[in-house]
Image (cartoon, grey):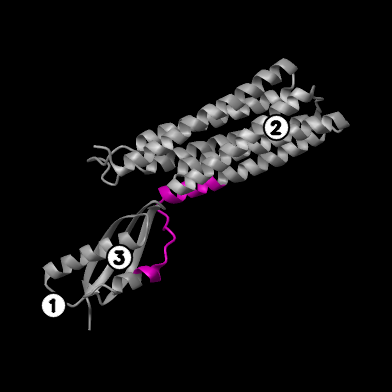
Amino acid sequence: MVTNTHLHYQKIRKILIIILFLNWAVALAKILYGLSSRCFSMTADGFHSLSDGTSNLIGILGIHFACQPIDKDHPYGHKKYETLFSLGIAAMLFIVSFNLLKEGWKRFHHPVLFQNDLGSFIVMFVTLAVNIWVMRYEYKKGNALKSDILVSDSLHTRADIFTSISVIVSLIVTRLGFPLIDPIVTMLISLFILFAAFQIAKQSSDVLCDTAVFLDDQKIIDIVLKIKGVQACHKIRSRGRIDDIYMDLHVQVRPDMHIDDAHQICYRIENTIKSSIPGITDVVVHMEPKES
């Protein structure tokens, strides 16, 4: 049986496969032209683009585990695997940032004059345009599908855009006779990549550590109090991803209420909250007698 969750992850997988081939095409163009023209910065940027393809593979693997159905060992499902594999992308960004910073520092002390021509600029601008389209498309789809993998991978692609821009700047300033601009720009870009990695790591760790999801508690209280029989609502807690929120709350009713009536109120509370607030997967209601 194909569930809505499975169809959801099928859409994400298809997007990742398309982007994987585009990233490999970009990387191949940079590496082949960089090697043939002995433009070392372009070759390095090409191998950096290969890391985008690697992150796509990580994403596809994460989606494979995330879309597995609920089982005995995973009664809450497998969606957090997507968040877990997002940390893998963050780790790759940390490594890329460190390597760029190290390479920029080395080139600052030992400037390298790049061999470049019109073909170098054409390759860099075309691949840059492809990367910008991929980043915007993936980020838009990631927000629409509430996918940690797509959003974090789009930030990885954005890091590749900054690196490509640094190569273009290097090609220009080399012609103007200012080779020291290249390592300075490279080190600045490494800091942008580091910040992107930190953002992904923080967002993923918040989910894995059950940090409270940002919800309007007063809105939830207003929803619950509109249900007949409820006299008070408090101790609202939440956790999970923005598209997979688990919530529990305490509700007070009359002390003499029959257990069947209280049970029906629990169902109404759960269904009303789910229909009113997108992303909520489960609501656990703790019933309490209203004290005088």
Q: Quadrant of the C terminus?
A: bottom left
Q: Position of residue 146 (x, y in %)?
A: 44, 48
Q: Is residue 140 above or below residue 31?
A: below
Q: Under tag 3, what secondary structure?
A: strand
Residue 153 lies in magenta, yes or no?
A: no
Q: Position of residue 259 (x, y in %)?
A: 12, 69
Q: Which residues are magenta?
A: 199-220
Query: Which of the two discs, 3 and 2, labels the residue nearer the N terminus?
Result: 2
Q: Is residue 101 visible?
A: no
Mark sitting on residue 125 = 2
Location of residue 212 (image quadrant):
bottom left
Circle 2 packing at 10 Å, graded few (<14), some (14-19), many (20+), is some
Mark sitting on residue 15 = none
Residue at numbered disc 3: 249
Main secondary structure found in the magenta portion? helix
Mark sitting on residue 256 = 1
Q: Is residue 120 above or below residue 257?
A: above
Mark 3 and mark 2: Cα distance apart in space: 54 Å
- Identity of the amino acid at label 1? Asp
Foreground of the two, 276 or 148: 276
- Identity of the amino acid at label 3? Leu
Q: Is residue 109 visible?
A: yes
Q: Is residue 66 above or below residue 35?
A: below
Location of residue 164 (image quadrant):
top right
Circle 1 packing at 10 Å, graded few (<14), some (14-19), many (20+), is few
